[in-house]
Amino acid sequence: MNNWYNFFQKNTISTILYPYKQTDFSNPYNNSLLIYNFQHKEKSIDIYLSTSKDINLHDLELLCDAVGWVRRPFRKVKIAIEYSFLTVSLFCIQKNNQKQLIGFARATSDYAFNATIWDVVIHPEFQGKGLGKILMYKMIQYLRSADIITITLFSDPEVLSFYKSIGFIIDPDGVKGMFWYPR
Ligand SMILES: CC(C)(COP(=O)(O)OP(=O)(O)OC[C@H]1O[C@@H](n2cnc3c(N)ncnc32)[C@H](O)[C@@H]1OP(=O)(O)O)[C@@H](O)C(=O)NCCC(=O)NCCS
């Protein structure tokens, strides 16, 4: 059984998680039911997963706004998504049948050895319920199914323990991420 499945079984007994096998994510299972009966604000809701890059940029901006991220130009976000190797979106359906984007992450890759995960976010109203962990496990699952060996990311200092809880480690050989910024 997958780790993330075990994790969820352990942590949210009333929730049913629907694992599914997907080896070719270039042909995505869009809008797959991920969690049935997720308890949210004393209601049961269903949570869906999509690997489609057809993402409503306004919805993504609202999600990023909700966690206080600095806004980025739509034009650039659109290009970043288009050229990402993988995007994973989590959403639920509101009463008015509107989709609400509640989680997102994407990865860039050289398509052979390495992938880097970016823009990991869960809407504040849905945080602390295991969704961030599931989102990350799904990212890892898809990247491993594409035979990507090394998965890296840049962690904000305050979320180090989140990534550590998923199995990410600070490089044991002391390799440091380095940055060049225009001055
Ligand atoms: C970081 C984030 C994606 C985590 O999502 P989440 O759904 O709240 O996380 P989960 O409920 O799956 O938590 C998984 C584990 O990480 C820990 N964790 C979650 N958020 C954390 C945080 N902000 N800081 C430290 N640990 C955190 C939890 O305690 C939990 O530990 P456990 O498995 O021992 O119980 C979410 O808080 C978020 O979107 N934050 C704002 C955006 C952000 O900072 N993104 C990362 C940029 S590098």
Image (cartoon, helix red, strand yellow):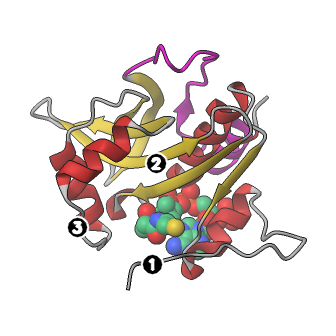
Residue found farthest to the left: 96
Q: Which residues are magenta?
A: 4-30
Residue type at numbered disc 2 = Ala
Residue at mark 3 to residue at mark 1: CA–CA distance:
18 Å
Residue type at numbered disc 1 = Tyr
Residue visible at 39% across and 79% down in the picture? 182
- Looking at the rendered image, the disc whose residue lies closer to the viewer, 2 or 3, is 3
Residue 155: say if magenta.
no
Q: Quadrant of the C terminus?
A: bottom left
Of mark 3 and mark 1, the one earlier in the sequence is 3
Q: Which residue is mark 1?
A: 181
Q: Which mark is residue 105?
A: 2
Q: Is residue 2 visible?
A: yes
Q: Quadrant of the N terminus?
A: top right
Magenta part, dominant SS = loop
- State the image quarter where residue 160 is shown: bottom right
Of mark 2 and mark 3, the one earlier in the sequence is 3
Q: Which residue is mark 3?
A: 71
- Looking at the rendered image, the disc whose residue lies closer to the viewer, 3 or 1, is 1
Residue visible at 45% across and 78% down in the picture? 181
